[in-house]
């Protein structure tokens, strides 16, 4: 180990581009992890969502396209188009103290919706990591149709 530490400055000097790339990747990983730790909502796995459903009966909001929602969605989820998602609406305002889980087909847009809910004063906000596809891949039941 001691020999490794003595040769490290020489390696870094001889391979400056690789060394800078390594440092940039480490910084990017640290920043990404800090952002995950500091966000005010949690990402749930399908098993974690199942536990939350059984324990707290959360409001499930699916932001998938309507065609994707009709093909499959988590049972009990309510469809809301992303373009019509308004955390300030009267209907959602009633659920401010309830746990709210936002999801979509693959989990890509749910972070933005969760951040909007936090800004609107919701305190218990969750996302489904991997979206409805992760739910299906975990072999959990899916509903089809508009309800």
Image (cartoon, rainbow, N blue to C red):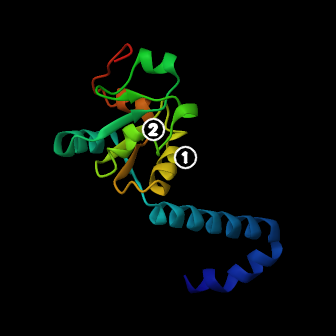
Mark 2 neighbour density, 10 Å: few (under 14) some (14–19) many (20 or more): many
Lower sequence index among marks 2 and 1:
1
Q: Position of residue 134 (x, y in %)?
A: 40, 33
Disc 1 element: helix
For this rendering, which residue is in front, 74 or 33? 74
- Residue at the location (47% across, 48% down)? 114
Q: Residue furthest left?
A: 55
Mark 1 neighbour density, 10 Å: few (under 14) some (14–19) many (20 or more): few
For this rendering, which residue is in front, 119 or 66? 119
Q: Position of residue 119 (x, y in %)?
A: 49, 56
Tag in front: 2 or 1: 1
Q: Position of residue 52 (x, y in %)?
A: 24, 44
- Left or right: 38 as drawn, with respect to 56: right
Check the picture and name the quadrant holding the N terminus: bottom right
Instruction: Provide the residue designation for mark 2.
Output: 130
Q: Position of residue 63 (x, y in %)?
A: 48, 32
Disc 2 element: loop
- Residue at the location (81% across, 78% down)? 13
On the image, which quarter does residue 102 sit in? top left
CA gap between label 2 and label 1 equals 14 Å
Q: Is residue 143 above or below residue 117?
A: above
Residue 112's disc number: 1
Q: Is residue 134 above or below residue 10?
A: above
């Amino acid at each position: 180990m001691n020999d490794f530490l003595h040769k490290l400055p020489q390696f870094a000097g001889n391979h400056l581009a690789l060394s800078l790339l390594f440092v940039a990747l480490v910084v990017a990983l640290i920043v990404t992890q800090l952002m995950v730790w500091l966000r005010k909502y949690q990402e749930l796995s399908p098993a974690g969502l199942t536990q939350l459903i059984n324990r707290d009966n959360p409001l499930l909001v699916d932001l998938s396209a309507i065609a994707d929602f009709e093909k499959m969605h988590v049972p009990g989820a309510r469809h809301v188009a992303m373009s019509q998602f308004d955390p300030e609406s009267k209907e959602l305002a009633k659920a401010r103290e309830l746990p709210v889980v936002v999801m979509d087909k693959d989990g890509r847009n749910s972070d933005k919706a969760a951040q909007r809910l936090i800004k609107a004063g919701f305190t218990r906000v969750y996302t489904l990591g991997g979206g409805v596809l992760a739910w299906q891949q975990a072999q959990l039941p899916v509903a089809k149709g508009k309800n």
